[in-house]
Image (cartoon, helix red, strand yellow):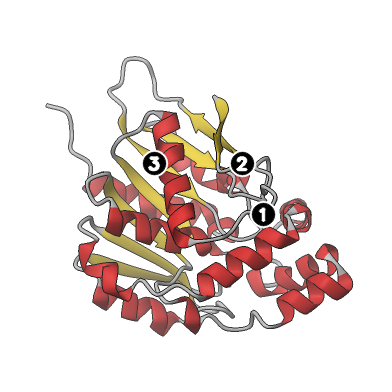
Amino acid sequence: MRGSIERNGGAIAYEVIDHVPAWEVPAPAVLFHHGVASCAAAWDGWTPALVGRHRLVRFDLRGHGASPLPAGFEWSLDATVDDLGAVADAAGVECFHLVGESLGGTVALAFAARHPERVLSLTVSNGTHVGGVIENLEPWERLIREEGMAAWSAHLMKERFFEGALTPEMARWYEAQQTSADPSAILGGAAMLVGTDLTPELARVACPVLLLHPDSSPFIPVDVMAALQRALPDARLQVFAHARHGLPFSHGAQCASAVARFIDRHTLKPA
């Protein structure tokens, strides 16, 4: 089922995937939040590991995919957290497992801290709680403004993926998604992320947390994720070898299997 909600002058497109057999009691839903220059469909590689037991809810961040960026939209963590909650409400899921990557991981972390009663478990992939530590964003604005989105996207592909990590079809598709993103959303979202520090809120994350991280992200070093693990009340960290910042896409099946096992440990079984 596809739908959209109107908020703050613009539509947010979302999708609910429900292939749980009619005779099964569905496990709690899983809600996904992608990062900068991605889109909801980038989670397709995760679907096989989760779709038989859970309803899956995913959406396009403003300025990405089918969610246009409203004129004059001002990026803030509060607004993006509220957008996530509004998508969950529209999809009819009150309590859910939450998965976020990169910027979406930071937003998901903030949502879990501010709405602990709604989040059963949290998975953050290649994300951070302190945006000021993110490295190598300096070329973005110059590339976008001087050379355009295609040049920026080509640059970013090298930051996200090792050569040969994707099939040619996957690489072409992902690069096209990046190129089609609204440049104001890219720069606005990145500025919001860099200005974020969730350190004071981490103690309020009540649910179990799984942290997935590549060993070779050019943006967020592994030790930043390790510091996040230590600061959370209940968290474990899994580092993937020979992976860059596009970990959830290049290693979708492996990440999804890890999350499926993690979620299963924290899902109450029906009597």
Q: Position of residue 163 (x, y in %)?
A: 71, 71
Q: Secondary structure at mark 1?
A: loop
Disc nearer the start of the sequence (1/2): 2
Crowd class of label 1 (few under 14; some 14 to 19; many from 20; radius 10 Å): few
Crowd class of label 3 (few under 14; some 14 to 19; many from 20; radius 10 Å): many
Q: Is residue 228 visible?
A: yes
Q: Which residue is mark 1?
A: 72
Tell me the amino acid under the disc marked 3: Val
Tell me the amino acid under the disc marked 1: Gly
Please give the label number shown on residue 9: 2
Q: Nearer the viewer, mark 2 or mark 3?
A: 2
Quadrant in which the N terminus appears: top right
- The residue located at (73%, 81%) in the rendering is 139
Q: CA distance from mark 2 to mark 3?
A: 27 Å
Q: Residue furthest top?
A: 23
Q: Secondary structure at mark 3?
A: strand
Q: Nearer the viewer, mark 1 or mark 3?
A: 1
Q: Are marks 1 and 2 in contact (CB under 8 Å)?
A: yes
Q: Nearer the viewer, residue 132 or 243?
A: 132
